[in-house]
Amino acid sequence: MINKNAEIRRKKREEIIQKLYEVDINGGVLEAEIEDEYIQASVNGVLEELETIDRKIKESLQKWTIGRLTYVDRAIIRFATYELIFTSLPSEIIINEALVLTRKFSDEGNNKMVGFTNKVLDNIKIALSR
């Protein structure tokens, strides 16, 4: 059973992914103001560090380019990469939350995208630990 704080944080993660998706679709423009401080800081953090985040993702993709990712998968992987690089949250939690979001928003029930996301984030985690 997920505790109340974890449930609230998961909902906020969903909003962050939605905002990053929106920015990507709109060519870098966020159309609506964000009222929640954590969500605002997270979205701004990803956007401010986008070059570093995308470089890490590109280094960890095998036989893929970042442009081949769907907007939603790119948002999930970007946010998780941001957290892996720039927060002190344990990587196991970050990756697990990204997989939950992938199951909810992207995976078609065959776990292919979940496996893909897990592999990319695991590659990033390993690269960061070197």
Image (tube, rainbow, N blue to C red):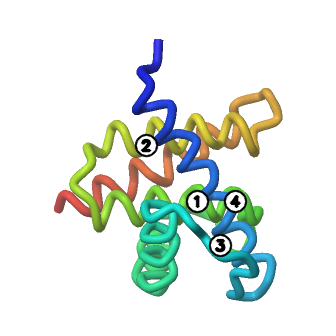
Q: In this figure, what is the number of numbered marks?
A: 4
Give the spatial CA distance, label 3 vs label 4. 22 Å
Q: Read off the residue under disc 3.
A: 65
Q: Which amino acid does label 4 sit on?
A: Gln
In terms of image quadrants, where is residue 65? Answer: bottom right
The mark that comes first in sequence, 3 or 4, is 4
Q: Is residue 49 above or below residue 66?
A: below
Q: How far apart are marks 1 and 3 (CA)?
A: 23 Å
Q: Name the residue under label 1.
A: 16
Residue 29, given in percent of the width and then of the height, sits at: 71, 87
Please name the residue shown 62% across and 41% down the image: 101
The residue identified by callout 4 is 18
Residue 20 horizontal/vertical position (percent): 64, 69
Please identify, in this view, whether the residue under mark 4 or under mark 2 is nearer the observer. 4
Q: Nearer the viewer, mark 1 or mark 2?
A: 1
Residue 128 as seen in the image, left or right of residue 117: left
Disc 3/disc 2 C-alpha distance (Å): 20 Å
- Label 1 and label 2: CA atoms lie apart by 15 Å
What amino acid does circle 3 point to?
Answer: Thr
| Image quadrant where residue 64 sits | bottom right
Pointer 2: what residue? 95
Above or below: residue 47 compared with residue 91: below
Q: Do the residues labelled 3 and 2 touch (CB within 8 Å)?
A: no
| Residue found 75% across the figure and 65% down from its top | 71
Going from the N terminus, do you reach mark 1 or mark 3 first?
1
